Amino acid sequence: MGAAVRGSNAIYLLDACQSVGQLPLDVDRIGCDLLSATGRKYLRGPRGRVSLYVRRSLLDRLEPPFMDAYSAQWTDMHTFQWRPDARRFEGFESSVANKLGLGAAVDHALGWGLDAIAARNAVLADRLREGLDQVPGVRVRDQGEQRSAIVTFTAEVPSLETLKRALLDRRMNVSLVSLELARLDLEPRGITGLVRASVHYYNTEEEVDRFVGAIAELVR
Ligand SMILES: *Cc1c(COP(=O)(O)O)cnc(C)c1O
């Protein structure tokens, strides 16, 4: 995408909510102008806090949707000036505790190193995919060359909701992707619903195996 828009007038906003905290990301290599990332997913920060990267050269082309005395300066009766930096996208009021929490989560991830996190996650996710592929009635549906720590699969069961609840009884959390959430991806592939299991570096191989065992038991 970055190569396709480079040199054009297009603005490239990458929503990296699922990637930040699990993969090394480099806005220059990606070639994006903006990158948004929630703190509550792979970074495991507090809910309700998001970060936004804005390429400096783009700042003057962007008008934030909201304005207050923090994001802009009231210069005389009828004029104002945006802040010169990307904080023009922030508001005056925010949760300081959440901000500190997100900072701690970022430090924690950087402390382990994103390369190390991605490498560990790949081991766990590969193991999970290999395990699930052995289960009759289950099919891993992830595509792409570099697959993430989010593992999605279909299961031949009467109800994915029931499967999810049965896993919850075993203290295993999965989420479901219904058709309404991803029509562009799922409809052409003839998929009506996916189960999504995410691993992170703190998971153990034993936990992954236990999960595969539970799926094998529940999908018959
Ligand atoms: C989760 C997610 C969001 C929203 O994140 P919030 O923490 O709810 O603000 C946006 N885009 C993508 C791709 C996501 O996965």
Image (tube, rainbow, N blue to C red):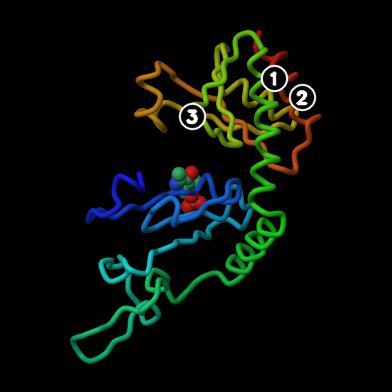
- Residue 196 lies left or right of residue 108; in this view the side is left
Q: Is residue 50 above or below residue 198?
A: below
The Cα atoms of the two marked residues, 1 and 3, are separated by 19 Å
User: Residue 112: percent from the left, percent from the top?
Assistant: 72, 54
Instruction: Using a 10 Å C-alpha cutoff, classify the residue at mark 3 as few (fewer than 14 neighbours), some (14 to 19) or many (20 or more).
Output: few
* Amino acid at circle 2: Asp
Find residue 134 and report its image quarter: top right
Calculate the distance from the C-alpha at mark 1 to the C-alpha at mark 2.
7 Å
Closest to the observer, 3 or 107: 3
The spot of residue 30 in percent (x, y) is: 43, 50
The amino acid at mark 1 is: Gly
Q: Earlier in the sequence, mark 1 or mark 3?
A: 1
Which residue is pictured at 54% across the width and 29% down the height? 176
Give the label on residue 144, or none: 3
Can you give x and y, in whole percent of width and height, for residue 17 in the image?
49, 48
- 1 and 2 marks in contact (CB < 8 Å): yes
Q: Secondary structure at mark 3?
A: loop
Labels 3 and 2 touching (C-beta < 8 A)? no
The kind of residue tagged 3 is: Gly
Q: Which residue is mark 1?
A: 131
Q: Nearer the viewer, mark 1 or mark 3?
A: 3
Callout 2 crowding tier (Cα within 10 Å): few <14, some 14–19, many ≥20: some
Tag 2 secondary structure? helix
Mark earlier in primary sequence (3, 2): 3
Q: Secondary structure at mark 1?
A: helix
User: What residue occupies the far right of the structure in this picture?
Assistant: 206
Image height of 192 relative to 56, above or below: above
Q: Which mark is residue 209?
A: 2
Quarter occupied by the C terminus? top right
Is label 1 within 8 A of ligand 1 (CB to nearest ligand atom)? no
Q: Which mark is residue 13?
A: none
